[in-house]
Image (cartoon, rainbow, N blue to C red):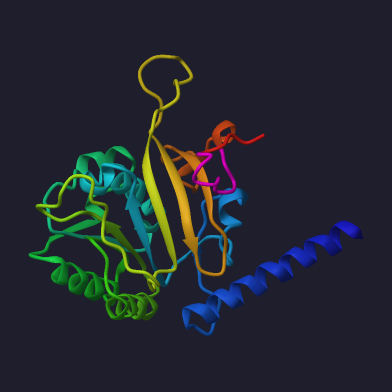
Amino acid sequence: MECEMAGSREARLAALRGRIAAIEAGTRTPTPVLPFGDRAIDGCFPGGGLPLGAWHEVVGAGLEGETGAAPAAFVGLLLRPLVTTGVVVWVARRSDLFAPGLAGLGFPAGRLIQVRARDEAEVLSVLEDALSTEGVAAAVGEAEAPDLTAGRRLQLACEKRGGLGLLLHRRPYGGRAGEGPRTVSGSASFSRWRVGPQPSGAPPDDIGLGPPRWRVELERCRGGRSGGWILEAQEAGHGPHPFRLVPQLADHDVAPAESGWRKAG
Protein backbone atom coordinates (compact mmCIF):
# COMPACT_ATOMS: atom_id res chain seq x y z
CA MET A 1 0.00 0.00 0.00
CA GLU A 2 2.78 2.43 0.90
CA CYS A 3 4.54 1.76 -2.44
CA GLU A 4 1.30 2.37 -4.32
CA MET A 5 0.73 5.64 -2.47
CA ALA A 6 4.32 6.74 -3.17
CA GLY A 7 3.94 5.90 -6.85
CA SER A 8 0.65 7.77 -7.03
CA ARG A 9 2.22 10.79 -5.35
CA GLU A 10 5.11 10.77 -7.82
CA ALA A 11 2.65 10.56 -10.73
CA ARG A 12 0.67 13.52 -9.39
CA LEU A 13 3.85 15.53 -8.93
CA ALA A 14 4.99 14.72 -12.49
CA ALA A 15 1.60 15.77 -13.87
CA LEU A 16 1.72 19.00 -11.86
CA ARG A 17 5.20 19.79 -13.20
CA GLY A 18 3.94 19.21 -16.73
CA ARG A 19 1.02 21.60 -16.21
CA ILE A 20 3.32 24.25 -14.75
CA ALA A 21 5.68 23.89 -17.73
CA ALA A 22 2.71 24.18 -20.10
CA ILE A 23 1.54 27.38 -18.41
CA GLU A 24 5.05 28.87 -18.59
CA ALA A 25 5.32 27.90 -22.26
CA GLY A 26 1.99 29.57 -22.99
CA THR A 27 0.12 26.38 -23.89
CA ARG A 28 -3.05 24.81 -22.46
CA THR A 29 -2.02 21.16 -22.46
CA PRO A 30 1.11 19.46 -21.10
CA THR A 31 3.99 19.79 -23.54
CA PRO A 32 5.39 16.57 -25.09
CA VAL A 33 9.00 15.98 -24.15
CA LEU A 34 12.13 14.33 -25.54
CA PRO A 35 13.47 12.27 -22.64
CA PHE A 36 17.13 11.39 -22.15
CA GLY A 37 16.16 8.12 -20.51
CA ASP A 38 17.99 8.78 -17.24
CA ARG A 39 16.26 10.14 -14.14
CA ALA A 40 19.34 12.18 -13.20
CA ILE A 41 18.86 14.31 -16.34
CA ASP A 42 15.12 14.09 -16.99
CA GLY A 43 14.44 15.03 -13.37
CA CYS A 44 15.92 18.48 -14.03
CA PHE A 45 12.98 19.30 -16.32
CA PRO A 46 9.50 20.04 -14.94
CA GLY A 47 7.92 17.75 -17.57
CA GLY A 48 10.40 14.87 -17.24
CA GLY A 49 12.40 15.61 -20.41
CA LEU A 50 13.45 18.26 -22.91
CA PRO A 51 10.16 19.91 -23.95
CA LEU A 52 9.11 20.01 -27.58
CA GLY A 53 7.20 23.04 -28.79
CA ALA A 54 10.00 25.22 -27.38
CA TRP A 55 13.49 26.39 -28.31
CA HIS A 56 16.74 25.85 -26.48
CA GLU A 57 20.22 27.38 -26.58
CA VAL A 58 23.45 25.38 -26.97
CA VAL A 59 26.79 27.08 -26.30
CA GLY A 60 30.21 25.62 -27.00
CA ALA A 61 32.77 25.46 -24.21
CA GLY A 62 36.12 27.16 -24.93
CA LEU A 63 37.16 27.08 -28.60
CA GLU A 64 33.96 25.22 -29.44
CA GLY A 65 32.36 28.67 -29.48
CA GLU A 66 34.19 29.16 -32.79
CA THR A 67 34.33 25.66 -34.31
CA GLY A 68 31.00 24.38 -33.01
CA ALA A 69 32.11 20.77 -33.62
CA ALA A 70 31.25 19.19 -30.27
CA PRO A 71 27.95 21.08 -29.86
CA ALA A 72 26.92 20.17 -33.42
CA ALA A 73 27.60 16.48 -32.79
CA PHE A 74 25.71 16.65 -29.50
CA VAL A 75 22.74 18.34 -31.19
CA GLY A 76 22.74 15.88 -34.10
CA LEU A 77 22.66 12.91 -31.74
CA LEU A 78 20.04 14.57 -29.54
CA LEU A 79 17.72 14.95 -32.55
CA ARG A 80 18.13 11.37 -33.79
CA PRO A 81 14.91 10.08 -32.15
CA LEU A 82 12.87 12.83 -33.87
CA VAL A 83 13.73 11.95 -37.48
CA THR A 84 10.95 9.36 -37.51
CA THR A 85 8.40 12.16 -37.14
CA GLY A 86 9.76 14.61 -39.71
CA VAL A 87 12.82 16.23 -41.23
CA VAL A 88 15.43 18.33 -39.45
CA VAL A 89 16.33 21.73 -40.95
CA TRP A 90 19.83 23.06 -40.18
CA VAL A 91 20.40 26.77 -40.94
CA ALA A 92 23.92 28.24 -40.85
CA ARG A 93 26.08 31.01 -42.28
CA ARG A 94 28.95 28.61 -42.87
CA SER A 95 29.08 25.50 -45.04
CA ASP A 96 31.10 23.39 -42.63
CA LEU A 97 28.40 21.06 -41.27
CA PHE A 98 29.92 17.59 -41.79
CA ALA A 99 26.93 15.44 -42.73
CA PRO A 100 28.98 12.18 -42.87
CA GLY A 101 29.92 12.80 -39.25
CA LEU A 102 26.24 13.02 -38.32
CA ALA A 103 25.60 9.84 -40.30
CA GLY A 104 28.34 8.17 -38.26
CA LEU A 105 26.34 9.00 -35.15
CA GLY A 106 23.29 7.28 -36.62
CA PHE A 107 21.57 10.40 -37.95
CA PRO A 108 20.10 9.57 -41.40
CA ALA A 109 21.38 12.10 -43.95
CA GLY A 110 18.17 11.74 -45.95
CA ARG A 111 16.24 13.42 -43.13
CA LEU A 112 18.49 16.48 -43.04
CA ILE A 113 17.88 19.73 -44.96
CA GLN A 114 20.79 22.21 -44.91
CA VAL A 115 20.19 25.92 -45.56
CA ARG A 116 22.96 28.48 -46.09
CA ALA A 117 22.01 31.94 -44.85
CA ARG A 118 23.63 35.28 -45.68
CA ASP A 119 23.62 36.81 -42.21
CA GLU A 120 22.31 36.30 -38.71
CA ALA A 121 18.98 38.00 -39.44
CA GLU A 122 18.36 35.53 -42.26
CA VAL A 123 19.36 32.59 -40.04
CA LEU A 124 16.69 33.57 -37.52
CA SER A 125 14.10 34.25 -40.24
CA VAL A 126 14.64 30.86 -41.92
CA LEU A 127 14.69 29.13 -38.54
CA GLU A 128 11.34 30.68 -37.67
CA ASP A 129 9.86 29.67 -41.04
CA ALA A 130 11.15 26.11 -40.70
CA LEU A 131 9.64 25.68 -37.24
CA SER A 132 6.29 26.88 -38.62
CA THR A 133 6.35 24.37 -41.50
CA GLU A 134 4.44 21.10 -41.46
CA GLY A 135 6.66 18.03 -41.59
CA VAL A 136 9.59 19.67 -39.76
CA ALA A 137 10.27 17.86 -36.50
CA ALA A 138 13.13 20.13 -35.41
CA ALA A 139 15.18 23.05 -36.68
CA VAL A 140 18.70 24.16 -35.76
CA GLY A 141 20.08 27.64 -36.32
CA GLU A 142 23.71 28.71 -35.94
CA ALA A 143 23.84 32.30 -34.74
CA GLU A 144 25.08 34.46 -31.90
CA ALA A 145 21.92 35.24 -29.96
CA PRO A 146 18.50 36.63 -30.82
CA ASP A 147 17.09 39.61 -29.00
CA LEU A 148 14.03 39.11 -26.84
CA THR A 149 11.62 39.95 -29.67
CA ALA A 150 13.22 37.43 -32.02
CA GLY A 151 13.32 34.87 -29.22
CA ARG A 152 9.62 35.28 -28.59
CA ARG A 153 8.93 34.84 -32.32
CA LEU A 154 10.92 31.61 -32.27
CA GLN A 155 8.88 30.39 -29.31
CA LEU A 156 5.60 31.12 -31.08
CA ALA A 157 6.86 29.27 -34.18
CA CYS A 158 7.75 26.24 -32.04
CA GLU A 159 4.31 26.23 -30.45
CA LYS A 160 2.58 26.42 -33.83
CA ARG A 161 3.66 22.91 -34.93
CA GLY A 162 5.11 21.53 -31.71
CA GLY A 163 8.61 21.42 -33.19
CA LEU A 164 11.88 21.52 -31.29
CA GLY A 165 14.06 24.58 -31.91
CA LEU A 166 17.78 24.69 -31.13
CA LEU A 167 19.98 27.76 -31.40
CA LEU A 168 23.64 26.78 -31.62
CA HIS A 169 25.73 29.79 -30.62
CA ARG A 170 28.74 30.41 -32.85
CA ARG A 171 31.05 33.39 -33.08
CA PRO A 172 30.68 35.02 -36.52
CA TYR A 173 33.34 35.47 -39.19
CA GLY A 174 36.07 37.82 -38.02
CA GLY A 175 35.44 37.24 -34.31
CA ARG A 176 38.52 37.73 -32.19
CA ALA A 177 40.05 34.78 -30.33
CA GLY A 178 38.92 34.68 -26.74
CA GLU A 179 35.58 36.29 -27.50
CA GLY A 180 32.67 34.17 -26.38
CA PRO A 181 29.36 34.21 -28.19
CA ARG A 182 27.16 37.20 -27.55
CA THR A 183 24.33 36.34 -25.19
CA VAL A 184 21.16 38.12 -24.21
CA SER A 185 20.18 38.37 -20.56
CA GLY A 186 16.65 37.16 -19.91
CA SER A 187 16.51 35.06 -23.08
CA ALA A 188 13.16 33.57 -24.07
CA SER A 189 14.66 30.08 -24.52
CA PHE A 190 13.40 27.26 -22.31
CA SER A 191 16.88 25.98 -21.48
CA ARG A 192 20.54 26.79 -22.02
CA TRP A 193 23.28 24.15 -22.45
CA ARG A 194 27.07 24.35 -22.52
CA VAL A 195 28.78 21.51 -24.38
CA GLY A 196 32.43 20.56 -24.76
CA PRO A 197 34.40 17.49 -25.84
CA GLN A 198 35.39 14.75 -23.41
CA PRO A 199 38.02 12.01 -23.96
CA SER A 200 36.45 8.70 -24.91
CA GLY A 201 36.79 5.64 -22.73
CA ALA A 202 38.40 2.42 -23.87
CA PRO A 203 36.16 0.11 -25.94
CA PRO A 204 35.22 -3.29 -24.49
CA ASP A 205 37.87 -5.08 -26.57
CA ASP A 206 40.49 -2.36 -25.93
CA ILE A 207 40.94 -1.93 -29.69
CA GLY A 208 40.48 1.47 -31.30
CA LEU A 209 38.46 4.33 -29.83
CA GLY A 210 35.42 4.15 -27.61
CA PRO A 211 32.13 5.95 -28.32
CA PRO A 212 32.31 9.77 -28.41
CA ARG A 213 31.66 11.62 -25.17
CA TRP A 214 30.60 15.14 -24.27
CA ARG A 215 30.94 17.23 -21.17
CA VAL A 216 27.46 18.70 -20.83
CA GLU A 217 26.17 21.36 -18.47
CA LEU A 218 22.55 22.43 -18.22
CA GLU A 219 23.10 26.01 -17.11
CA ARG A 220 19.49 27.14 -16.99
CA CYS A 221 16.09 25.47 -17.23
CA ARG A 222 12.79 27.29 -16.86
CA GLY A 223 10.92 25.83 -13.90
CA GLY A 224 13.63 23.19 -13.38
CA ARG A 225 17.16 22.92 -12.08
CA SER A 226 20.67 22.90 -13.49
CA GLY A 227 23.08 19.98 -13.68
CA GLY A 228 26.29 18.70 -15.26
CA TRP A 229 27.12 15.28 -16.72
CA ILE A 230 29.42 13.29 -18.97
CA LEU A 231 27.34 11.76 -21.77
CA GLU A 232 28.38 9.02 -24.17
CA ALA A 233 26.91 8.23 -27.58
CA GLN A 234 24.83 5.09 -27.73
CA GLU A 235 24.63 3.31 -31.07
CA ALA A 236 21.33 3.25 -32.93
CA GLY A 237 19.50 0.01 -32.21
CA HIS A 238 20.73 -0.15 -28.62
CA GLY A 239 17.62 1.41 -27.14
CA PRO A 240 15.40 4.41 -27.81
CA HIS A 241 17.76 6.99 -26.28
CA PRO A 242 20.89 8.20 -28.07
CA PHE A 243 22.90 9.04 -24.93
CA ARG A 244 24.21 7.04 -22.02
CA LEU A 245 25.20 8.70 -18.76
CA VAL A 246 28.75 7.78 -17.73
CA PRO A 247 28.04 6.97 -14.07
CA GLN A 248 31.55 7.14 -12.61
CA LEU A 249 31.91 10.69 -13.96
CA ALA A 250 28.33 11.84 -13.47
CA ASP A 251 27.73 15.09 -11.65
CA HIS A 252 24.07 15.55 -10.89
CA ASP A 253 24.42 19.10 -9.59
CA VAL A 254 26.57 21.83 -11.03
CA ALA A 255 29.64 22.35 -8.87
CA PRO A 256 30.63 25.88 -7.82
CA ALA A 257 32.81 27.55 -10.43
CA GLU A 258 35.83 27.67 -8.16
CA SER A 259 35.78 23.96 -7.35
CA GLY A 260 35.33 22.62 -10.89
CA TRP A 261 33.54 19.39 -11.76
CA ARG A 262 33.07 16.66 -9.18
CA LYS A 263 32.86 12.92 -9.47
CA ALA A 264 29.76 11.31 -8.11
CA GLY A 265 30.22 9.69 -4.74
- Splitting the image into 4 quarters, where does residue 89 fall? bottom left
Q: Establish if 132 lies above or below 41.
A: below
Q: Nearer the viewer, residue 58 or 136?
A: 58
Image coordinates of residue 209 in percent, x first then y, are 36, 22
Q: Residue at x 56, y 37 (%)?
A: 262
Task: Tell whether 111 sits left or right of 33.
Answer: left
Image coordinates of residue 73 in percent, x first then y, are 31, 44
Q: Residue furthest front?
A: 258
Q: Residue at x 26, y 75 (%)?
A: 133
Magenta highlight: main SS: loop
Is residue 84 on the magenta stretch?
A: no
Count of numbered tags: 0
- Splitting the image into 4 quarters, where does residue 143 fall? bottom left
Image coordinates of residue 17 in percent, x first then y, are 63, 71
Q: Which residues are magenta?
A: 250-260
Q: Residue furthest right?
A: 1
Q: Nearer the viewer, residue 52 or 179?
A: 179
Quadrant location of the C terminus in the rendered image: top right
Q: Residue at x 60, y 77 (%)?
A: 19
Q: Establish if 153 lies above or below 100.
A: below
Image coordinates of residue 205 in percent, x first then y, are 46, 15
Quadrant location of the N terminus in the rendered image: bottom right
Q: Establish if 13 lies above or below 177.
A: below
